[in-house]
Image (cartoon, grey):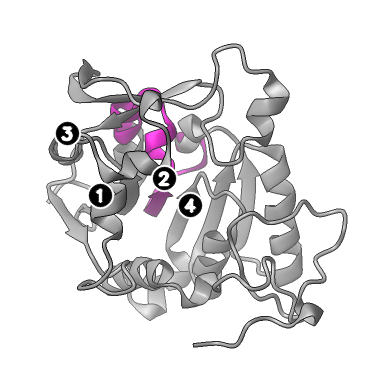
Amino acid sequence: MRPLSSPAMSAVPAHVPPFSQQNIRLPDGTETLPGAPLIAESAGMAAYLRTVNMLFGSAERANVKIADVGCLEGCYTAEFARAGYDATGIEVRAVNMKKCQFVSDSLGLPNLRFVQDDAANLADHGPFDAVLCSGLLYHLENPAAFLQTLADTTRRVLLLETHYATRRRSPSWALYRPWQFSRMIIHEGNPGRWYREYADDAPQEQVENALWASYGNPRSFWIEKRHLLRRLLEVGFSAVYEQYDFLEDVVKDSFIQKRNRSLFVAIRDRTGHAI
């Protein structure tokens, strides 16, 4: 286990908004969120890289384009670039883009870039050989439609980390408030639950600063897990599986059960067609 960061590592410039979740160590020793685990040492980042590294040889990485959709503060995108991939982070909020730009400027990597745009416009920036969609799908009003966008833009592999709905009351509800979830209904042809993000009349400033909420849609739809898997098959990914090594400990870690959230992998063959 690495030692806790020293105060000397906390010198992120005052003009950069404070990082809320993602910590990477920059070349000068600065950490973006001192005291928090480094993204580079996390089980999640290791799992993402383990999958893409199995699909793409080290000699071809420089030509492999990876998108991190809804990249938040850009640190996962940066780690893909550090691993040698051509990495693009897409983020809609201006406050997060300032942090992404700081990371990019600090690293100075020619294979790292960030664009400010809505995830719905992913196709405008692709196609990509690999796409990471982590912590985004369950913040969308029409997630089934977005899965089609992901399929249309992904040539080889999609890494999808997301919450999903359950038919019975879930332990994950304790992380939110029960009234935020609707009863089970059908939306876009899939069973699931609506999740209330914020009030319908929330001012734009509140939406901009709600870094852990949706953008532009006051409620989101969580698809039930088995129908989420079916939808991935419907949009063209015929090799679909659940990857468990994003957990710190696959025996003791109850993250999946407590949060109804997991990492799903969907693969196409090298021509971009369904296998």
Q: CA distance from mark 4 to mark 3?
A: 32 Å
Q: Nearer the viewer, mark 4 or mark 1?
A: 4
Task: Give the number of the disc on residue 272.
Answer: 1
Q: Which residue is mark 4?
A: 68
Badge 1: residue crowd in 10 Å (few <14, some 14–19, many ≥20) = some
Q: Nearer the viewer, mark 2 or mark 3?
A: 3
Residue 89 in picture, x, y percent from top left? 56, 51
Task: Give the number of the disc on residue 127.
Answer: 2
Mark 1 is on which residue type? Gly
Query: Measured along the vertical axis of the image, is residue 17 above or below residue 197?
Result: below
Q: Which residue is mark 3?
A: 168
Residue 26 in picture, x, y percent from top left? 70, 75
| Left or right: residue 223 compared with residue 13 | left
Residue at 25% in and 49% down:
272
Q: Nearer the viewer, mark 4 or mark 3?
A: 3
Residue at 38% in and 36% down:
138
User: Which residue range is magenta in the image?
Assistant: 123-148
Residue at 65% in and 66% down:
110
Q: CA distance from mark 1 to mark 2?
A: 10 Å
Q: Quadrant of residue 78?
A: bottom right
